[in-house]
Amino acid sequence: MYRITTPDFNLDHTLSCGQVFRWQKNGNLWTGVVNGAVIRAKQEREELIIDSILDRNFIREYFRLDDDMVKIYESINRDALMDALIRKYRGLRLVRQDPWECLVSYICSSNNTIRNIKNSISRMCECFGKEIGSGYYSFPEPEMLAVIETCQMQQCRLGFRSSRVLEIASRVAEGEFDLYRLGKLSYEEARLELVKIHGVGNKIADCVLLFAFGKLESFPVDTHIEKIMELHYGRHITGTKSKRKEAIAGFARRYFGGYCGYAQEYLYFEDLGT
DNA sequence: CCCCAGGTGTCAG
DNA sequence: CTGACACATGGG
């Protein structure tokens, strides 16, 4: 058990905003499984209290505690809306997820509800992850999922996404798709690689780039973001129908700048609540 | 029984 | 190149 002093950090907002799927809150205590280890976390004012075998450097990295939020807020605060959202959700941080878990999680997200996504991921971990004590399970490695039969996967209730998960698991396990190499590429290069995966389009690629590879210039446009961006910025955006979401992403990148990924998460959290 | 959900792949026109 | 539709599962 140890404490980390953290200005501009809000644990509740960070774990409730929809970027992660495996954290649960009981009372004021959050529990999650990250990189094969249980983390229990709670916050008291500017202190983050952690109970985990993972060390404080890992936690700092995971919660991006070295991000200079004053600088980031200054950068994305382009208008009254973002100013209000920064005040409302101050301390919401992006986290650094494991790329494999993040990729599979967001493949599961397509045309799905948050509730179903969480349930599917939870079942995948229970069925195919390793027991790490207290009834918690690690996220299954690609090598594990690569040898799973379609019929065994059905109990996880992924629907049509099941085959997509098994396919990329095999490719990663075989070494044919080097997921961890993507971190060394630029945002644009890595995005082009990700969308080659069956079941990964621009939106899911952007989620993986933002939540796992820390590409803060990524701006995933889903139905929530599309709705809220149309409402507030629609008149600035060109492009129609099928090109509309890419146009929104392009506008956001220019408008909010290189940290637009943070802006995206504040907008998304706002739309979740309303 | 209808519709929709952190989208994407596919297939006519 | 564009738009329509299917896709499994769960819930309103």
Image (cartoon, coloured by chain):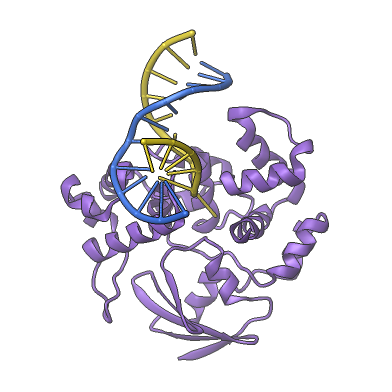
Chain colours: A purple, B yellow, C blue
Residue B4 at what x, y percent from top left? 50, 43
The answer to whether B10 is drawn above or below residue A158 in the figure is above
The answer to whether A200 is drawn above or below residue A58 in the figure is above
**Side of A75 where C11 appears, left or right:** left
Residue A215 at what x, y percent from top left? 58, 53
- The N terminus of chain A - image quarter: bottom left
The residue positioned 35% from the left and 75% from the top of the image is: A37
**Side of A224 where A1 appears, left or right:** left
Could you say which is closer to the camera, residue A228 or residue A134? A228
Could you say which is closer to the camera, residue A188 or residue A144? A144
- The C terminus of chain A - image quarter: bottom right
Note whether residue A131 is visible: yes
**Side of A49 where A108 appears, left or right:** left
Note whether residue A195 is visible: no
**Side of A40 where A252 appears, left or right:** right
Residue A75 at what x, y percent from top left? 77, 59
Q: How many marks?
A: 0
The residue positioned 49% from the left and 90% from the top of the image is: A2
The residue positioned 64% from the left and 54% from the top of the image is: A264
The residue positioned 64% from the left and 44% from the top of the image is: A227
The answer to whether A52 is drawn above or below residue A87 in the figure is below
Residue A217 at what x, y percent from top left? 64, 50
